Image (tube, rainbow, N blue to C red):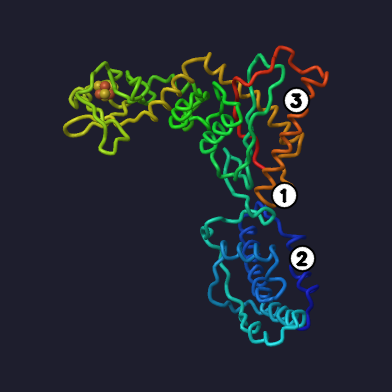
Amino acid sequence: MKNKSYTDLDEYFSYLEKEFDLTEKDKAKATRKIKEMAQDLYILKSAFENHNQIEHYESFKTLIQVFEQQCMIKEPSEDSIEKEEIIEDCEEQIQVSAGAVGRDEEIKSSSKTLPQIEIREKPEGEKIISSPHNTDAEYTKKRNQKVVGHKGFVTETCDPENKVQFITDVNLETATHSDAQEKPRIEDRLENNGCKPESLYGDAGFVNGKTILESKGKGIDLAGPSSGRSQSIENFEREDRPLDIADFEVEIDDISKELSILLCLNKEKPLDQKRSDKGNHVLVHFDKDICTQCPLCTRCPVKIGTHTSTLTVNEEQYAGAARHHQYMESADYRKECGIRAGAESMVNEIANGHGACKSKHKTETMSRLQLIFASIRLQCKKIHQVYGGVRPRSSKRSRSGRNSRSYCVVSI
Ligand code: SF4
């Protein structure tokens, strides 16, 4: 392996292009290949980390970062002579190419015996690189789909009176950014841009007790199914389904917005109720003996203790549970929330018709810009439909920004 050039090194690593397949279904084979790749990352790292040019390349810095996040260096192995030679050959080349007067010692201090490289069980570091093509991209799971990249959020009007529905907000965030995190930011941007809706329709990712109350505080009715709950109407209607706080008779004070329990499902009044010391929950006590005898006790959320039965609840939990009941019990409400599904065609057009589903860029900022431009293109098309003499698809709609629906567009 002596007197090898960079071309030889290139040839050695050409398996990455020809044979290496990260979609390999054979787990043992894939694991073996990943180990091999980790070893080779080390070879490249050792070969070039002191090179006066290559060490400054962004791609090389990414390689080093990936190695440090994903790999651990163990004691030298005996069967790595071949790869060790590659490092030595490479070092020789570096000395020639760098004209490295006085750097020989530095370079020669690289490992002469190739150590064992192990893959970490969990990558280390604050921001783990998921794709070398976009180091800002993050990994997440959406339903059963594994996603590396970003996801976009697009909001459009949904007033049935509108001739055409217009886009009112666009943003792109990392794939791990949750819909519920983005919801208040969407509302703030809509308000700042004079597009504050009366109602905002989102899917379950956007809607929970906390976000419902937050929106209400801003004068927005956040509509949609409540997250974290089974959306099966059959399960909800089962006689043995577990009860929740929305099964209790509850009063919300008009001014303080604080909750108090009036009756349980068995028509029992609480013995007493008070705020917890931290003030974030209400502790509601019931007669333990009555609860023990109650036919609903196995379904009830009260905790039956030695002296008393306690229900621990807060306003957010109630808002989430009450929304779940509303969504499960009212076909009209489900139909109203179904208006959000109209955003699917807009999502599809931005993602596929205007190319936003694949980012052409390496950074989050540029990917965000790409999504914004894709949305502007669609918005121009919509404006043309209204003012350009093109007959809109639905002739029943007129312009208004009264209502908006929000939807996580696509992972890019
Ligand atoms: S277990 Fe107690 S609190 Fe629950 S429904 Fe029965 S009586 Fe009411």
Question: Which of these two is toward me, 214 or 360?
Answer: 214
Amino acid type, mark 1: His
Question: Is disc 1 in contact with disc 2, using a CB cutoff of under 8 Å?
Answer: no
Which comes before the other along the chain, label 2 or label 3?
Answer: 2
**Nearer the N terminus, badge 1 or badge 2?**
2
Tell me the residue at 70%/66% (across/down). Answer: 57
* CA–CA distance in space, label 3 to label 1: 26 Å
83 left or right, relative to 260: right
Q: Position of residue 265 (x, y in %)?
A: 30, 18
Pointer 3: what residue? 382
Q: How crowded is mark 2: few (under 14 residues within 10 Å), some or many (20 or more)?
A: few
In the picture of the structure, the residue carrying the numbered disc 1 is 361
Is tag 3's residue or tag 1's residue first in the polypeptide sequence?
Answer: 1
- Label 1 SS: loop
Rendered image quadrant of residue 247: top left
Tell me the mark number nearer the camera, choosing from 2 and 3: 3
**Residue identifier under label 2:** 14
Q: Quadrant of residue 291?
A: top left
How many numbered circles does the render carry?
3
Residue drawn at (60%, 19%) of the image: 402
User: Which kind of residue does numbered mark 2 sit on?
Assistant: Ser
Q: Which callout, 3 or 1, points to the residue nearer the camera? A: 3
**Category of crowding for the residue at label 3, using alpha-carbon neighbours closer than 10 angstroms: few (below 14), some (14–19), many (at least 20):** some
User: Badge 1 local density, few (<14 within 10 Å), some, or many (20+)?
Assistant: some
**Quadrant in the picture for residue 295:** top left
Mark 2–mark 3 Cα distance, whole angstroms, equals 48 Å
The percent coordinates of residue 118 (x first, y second) are 56, 67
Question: Where residue 165 appears, x then y in whole percent?
Answer: 68, 22
Q: Note whether 391 is above or below 382 in the view shown.
A: above
